[in-house]
Image (cartoon, rainbow, N blue to C red):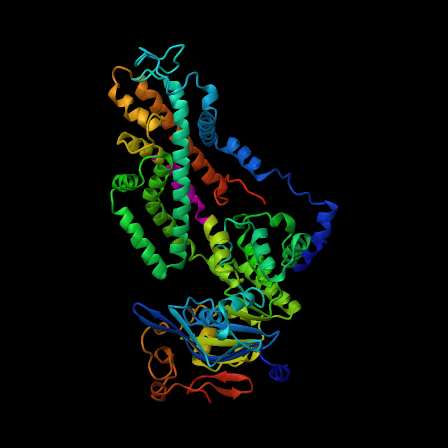
């Protein structure tokens, strides 16, 4: 057996040099990821397309909107969709399409900002808390308990009341109200992972705690983190809508999808249903897109799942 | 052989090692005041039932026991002349994986599933050897081919789940040997593997360790595993060493009733028999409770008498190099 193997492996080092074994073609890993996404996860790719659409809508808002979002068009109050006003006008005779395009900016910034911030916070706290345990864990988790024991809206309203309205403050409030639950989930994932043999094996080869945390624990809890983040994105867009509805969101005249839906959309639901339908569609498309994309990414980035791609370095 | 070994300074010198775990339900005394030595290049087999302190002993040597709840105490715990218990965690990290390395029981779970084999190998080598780029890559390939893995550069890009159990254990061995350790600890390295693979892995460990001149410790509950691969065997029971002898001596002339029982309970293919396989009645004592003053094996011992209840039997040399801890052996 042993000798047989020895014959097969002549001199592996020189084999590489001579190119007898050619490694498979390597693209940049992002390109690889994209190819795999389109090939194996069509729904995820569609979600990605929606997300891309949202981002483009936000960036290109000034270019593609036919009117200024705040300009009022005389008596064209709650006008139905037409050739001039693609998606109709709202109660103040402002072009709905332009407002949705500009609203994408607010919704995207608030959504991504809040989720980014809360994901970073919850990951750091969850991982440290789960890995080190002990007193740090106890203190952190009681703090998390305290946040979780308040109704979510109450916390946000309190924070908004302290900070005052504004886009950055909305992001802060959403992140602070949302990170606690997520950190609990991350922590429980870490509790399971840290007992795995490979963590012990990493210690046995002389890895420091930081190396173990970043190289061994973090990638293994990435799946729940990605899921939490994508779910959180939808929630953040909706929560921003709630805040705006209560008058604590991004102050007018800036348009946000949530405010459009909960303001005019609600008030004129029967007279001008497009006022509810289009912002609602925009929110749904955004949330759906992020969820699908996140789901697909989680599968693709997990080497254990069949059909998962292999990210090479 | 014996005499030259005795002349050498032990690479690992353990005296009065005692490991306790302070748990919610009480104190678990996993290793109770044991002493042994490991000599350079020697191959030591450690045999015993589950929960008799084999793994804990050597995890303590690497200081991999979580402290607290664990507590390691020893009169002497020297690796290559340095007192392991006095080292800082940082100094310990320089020893782990570099001078003392370990192969774990289950290769299915001891490799990180989300990192490629290459990443996990490079991590260790970079940590201890300061190799870079091509030299690093060549070292990985060299190691993988040494442990008998074909197409090593393809394998470097594989994830653990793409390899079989045997291959993964080979990778674990490659990682353990990557920095030319002085001591290789193998904690039940074949328990999770197919019988056909077990022998290959054991022989691989033996031959690679011999090439490196590394001392090996093979922890197992299987006498068959240590028979052909070790120089000396240490039998543990209830956190104590009950018998030590060279491998041929122990198989030929087991003295402790526990060792005898273990040897009798190995199924044999060379003797045809209709009888049921022998087993030692009872179970090891609960190390959580205070043990009896006398011999720990007493409840299961076929040759006990009154003297065994009152005093702990001394660990004494009955023959040259053959130590045993039993009142009833003369």
Q: Residue B322 at x, y = what percent?
A: 53, 84
Q: Residue A123 at x, y = what percent?
A: 41, 48
Q: Residue B128 at x, y = what percent?
A: 60, 62
| Magenta stretch, main secondary structure class | helix
Find out whether residue B327 is within the magenta segment: no
Placement of A218 over or under A36, stated as above or below: below
Is residue B269 something that shows in the picture? no
In this orientation, which residue lies closer to the viewer: A274 or A155? A155
Quadrant for the C terminus of chain A in the image: top right
In this orientation, which residue lies closer to the viewer: B18 or B128? B128
In this orientation, which residue lies closer to the viewer: A243 or A232? A243
Find out whether residue A224 is within the magenta segment: yes
Residue drawn where x is 59% and y is 47% of the image: B157
In this orientation, which residue lies closer to the viewer: B213 or B100? B100
Placement of A80 over or under A12, stated as above or below: above
Residue drawn where x is 46% and y is 19% of the image: A64
For the view shown, which residue lies furthest in the right direction? Answer: A18
Q: Which residues are magenta?
A: A220-235
| Image position of B138 (left or right of B265) | right
Residue drawn where x is 39% and y is 35% of the image: A111
| Image position of B171 (left or right of A83) | right
Q: Residue A229 at x, y = what percent?
A: 40, 40
């Amino acid at each position: 057996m042993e000798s047989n193997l020895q014959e097969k492996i002549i001199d592996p080092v020189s084999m590489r040099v001579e190119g007898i074994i050619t490694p498979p073609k390597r693209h940049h890993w992002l390109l690889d990821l994209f190819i795999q996404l389109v090939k194996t996860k069509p729904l995820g790719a569609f979600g990605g397309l929606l997300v891309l659409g949202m981002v483009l809508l936000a960036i290109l808002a000034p270019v593609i909107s036919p009117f200024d979002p705040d300009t009022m068009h005389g008596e064209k109050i709650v006008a139905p969709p037409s050739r001039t006003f693609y998606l109709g006008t709202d109660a103040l005779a402002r072009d709905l399409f332009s407002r949705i395009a500009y609203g994408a900016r607010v919704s995207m910034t608030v959504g991504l900002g809040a989720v980014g911030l809360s994901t970073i916070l919850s990951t750091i706290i969850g991982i440290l808390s789960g890995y080190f345990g002990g007193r740090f864990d106890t203190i952190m988790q009681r703090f998390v308990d305290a946040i979780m024991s308040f109704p979510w809206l109450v916390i946000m309203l309190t924070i908004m009341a302290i900070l005052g309205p504004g886009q950055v403050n909305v992001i802060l409030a959403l992140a602070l109200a949302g990170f606690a639950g997520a950190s609990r989930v991350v922590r429980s994932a870490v509790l399971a992972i840290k007992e795995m043999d490979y963590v012990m094996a990493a210690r046995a080869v002389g890895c420091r705690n930081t190396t173990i945390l970043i190289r061994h624990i973090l990638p293994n809890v990435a799946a729940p983190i990605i899921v939490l983040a994508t779910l959180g994105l939808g929630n953040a867009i909706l929560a921003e809508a709630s805040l705006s509805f209560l008058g604590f969101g991004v102050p007018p005249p800036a348009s946000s999808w949530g405010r459009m839906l909960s303001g005019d959309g609600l008030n004129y639901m029967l007279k001008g249903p497009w006022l509810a339908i289009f912002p609602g569609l925009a929110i749904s498309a955004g949330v759906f897109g992020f969820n699908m994309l996140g789901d697909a990414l989680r599968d693709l980035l997990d080497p254990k799942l069949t059909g998962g791609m292999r990210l090479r370095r | 052989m014996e005499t030259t070994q005795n002349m050498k300074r032990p690479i690992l010198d353990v005296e009065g090692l005692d490991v306790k775990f302070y748990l919610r339900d009480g104190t678990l005394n996993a290793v109770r005041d044991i002493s042994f030595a490991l000599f350079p290049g020697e191959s030591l087999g450690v045999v015993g039932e589950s929960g008799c302190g084999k793994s804990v002993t050597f995890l303590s040597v690497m200081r991999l026991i979580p402290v607290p709840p664990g507590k390691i105490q020893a009169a002497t715990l020297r690796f290559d002349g340095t007192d392991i218990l006095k080292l800082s965690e940082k100094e310990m990290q320089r020893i782990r994986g570099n001078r003392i390395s370990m192969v774990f029981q289950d290769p299915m779970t001891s490799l990180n599933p989300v990192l490629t084999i290459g990443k996990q190998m490079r991590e260790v080598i970079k940590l201890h050897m300061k190799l870079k780029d091509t030299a690093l890559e060549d070292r990985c390939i060299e190691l993988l081919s040494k442990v008998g893995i074909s197409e090593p550069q393809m394998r470097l890009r594989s994830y653990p789940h793409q390899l079989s159990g045997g291959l993964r254990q080979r990778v674990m061995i490659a990682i353990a040997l990557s920095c030319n350790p002085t001591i290789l600890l193998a904690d039940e390295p074949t328990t999770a593997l197919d019988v056909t693979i077990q022998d290959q892995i054991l022989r691989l460990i033996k031959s690679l360790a011999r090439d490196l001149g590394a001392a090996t410790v093979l922890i197992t509950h299987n006498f068959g595993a240590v028979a052909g691969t070790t120089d000396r065997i240490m039998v543990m029971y209830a956190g104590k060493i009950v018998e030590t002898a060279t491998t041929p001596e122990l198989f030929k002339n087991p003295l402790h009733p526990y060792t005898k029982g273990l040897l009798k309970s190995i199924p044999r293919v060379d003797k045809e028999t209709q009888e049921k396989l022998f087993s030692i009645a009872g179970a090891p004592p609960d190390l959580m409770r205070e043990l009896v003053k006398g011999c720990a094996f007493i409840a299961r011992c076929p040759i006990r008498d009154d003297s065994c209840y009152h005093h702990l039997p001394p660990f004494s040399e009955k023959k040259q190099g053959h130590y045993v801890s039993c009142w009833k052996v003369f």
